Image: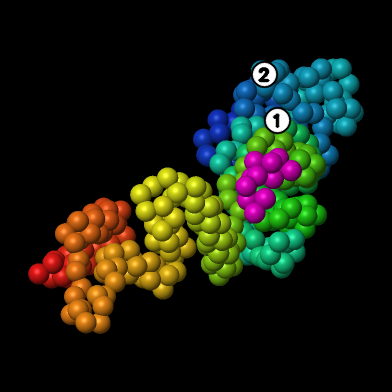
Amino acid sequence: MALMDFIKKQFIDILQWTEDQDGVLAWRFPMQEMEIQNGASLTVRDSQLTVFVNEGTVADVFQPGMYKLTTQTLPVLTYLKNWDKLFESPFKSDVYFYSTRVQLDRKWGTPNPITIRDKEFGIVRLRAFGIYSYHIVDPKAFYQKISGTRDIYTRDELEGQLRNTMIASITDLFGESGVSFIDMAANQEEFGKAVREKMTAVFTDFGLALDSLVVQNISLPEELQKVLDQRISMNMLGDMNRYTQYQVANSIPLAAQNEGGMAGLGVGLGAGLGFGQVFGQNISQAMQPQAAPAAAPAAAPAAAAVSPDDVVATLEKLHGLVEKGILSKEEFEAKKAELLKKLV
């Protein structure tokens, strides 16, 4: 019976993994009813690491290269199995291959807003998302803490653990930093570096190296963003008022050099400050022709005389207001008709 069992067994001469399935981090070589031939060939490619496990205990770890499996190349396994130097028979062992390729463009994000205390806005809820990359550097730690004896372990199975751990660290950073949302959003690169430093130890404990971590966006929920937009608008409005006041102050010395002197400043001041009533009053004054001569003695009949030169001068001033956009063409035409009537 023992002879028949021996005949049924298959002996493995070559151990290798072609990584024909994307996203696999760990793969166990199929060993059912099979034993490894002494002197078998082991091929570990540049993007791989290989681990021999004997009865649940990690024995030998192989870096990229080609190996002939003997007691010399399997020192720990030889010790565990108490082989002597004359070992020549096939042996049983679990063989795991691990992919060391960099897992790129892995996404992280806050599924729900993180509530923090902001020094400018009080209690706010923040969202953040970005990408990161990593690769396996310690297959022994990865076997012991992550993949275990699974036939296949994929990166999708690891994703939730890494993402949730990362978000917990980000929540702590939000709370510990004391940096306002505005400053944090404006310095996403520095915030990403801080998150990476905090997460490096976690990845190392899993047998991984965190190659990069990028914060692509930090934002407020929609309702809080609307409040922030309103505040920004109010701040911009305040700046515009100060700017207008500055412009008016600069226009005072210039007004004295222009025709009409300080009298023309009233129109510019009214328009600059946006006071509709003051603006209307100044326009009305600018549109009035020069005052009529004093009335004749009581014995003489009263007559209001307007000289053509005064009318022309007034029209020129009004036309200048049209060119500046202060007075509309319709208003100009109406006033022109009124002044021409006074010449009749």
Q: Position of residue 295 (x, y in %)?
A: 26, 75
Q: Amino acid at mark 1?
A: Thr
Q: Position of residue 330 (x, y in %)?
A: 19, 66
Q: In which quadrant of the rendered view does residue 48 lie?
A: top right
Is 112 or 161 nearer to us in this picture? 112
Q: Tag 2's secondary structure?
A: strand
User: Which residue is label 2 attached to?
Assistant: 65
Q: Is residue 244 above or below residue 43?
A: below
Along the polypeptide, which appears first: circle 1 or circle 2?
Answer: 1
Viewer-proximal residue, 16 or 293?
Answer: 293
Q: Which mark is residue 50?
A: 1
Q: Quadrant of the N terminus?
A: top right
**Disc 2 crowd, CA 10 A, few/some/many (<14, 14-19, 20+):** few
Question: Percent position (x, y) of residue 282?
Answer: 38, 66
Which residue appears at 19% of the width and 79% of the height?
300
Magenta residue span: 182-194
Left or right side of 215 for 79: right
The residue drawn where x is 20% and y is 73% is: 304
Which residue is located at x 65 percent, y 54 percent? 182
Q: Answer yes or no: is residue 34 visible.
A: no
Q: Kindly report the distance in space between the C-alpha atoms of the residues bearing marks 1 and 2.
A: 10 Å
| Protein image colouring | rainbow
Helix, strand, or loop for circle 1? strand
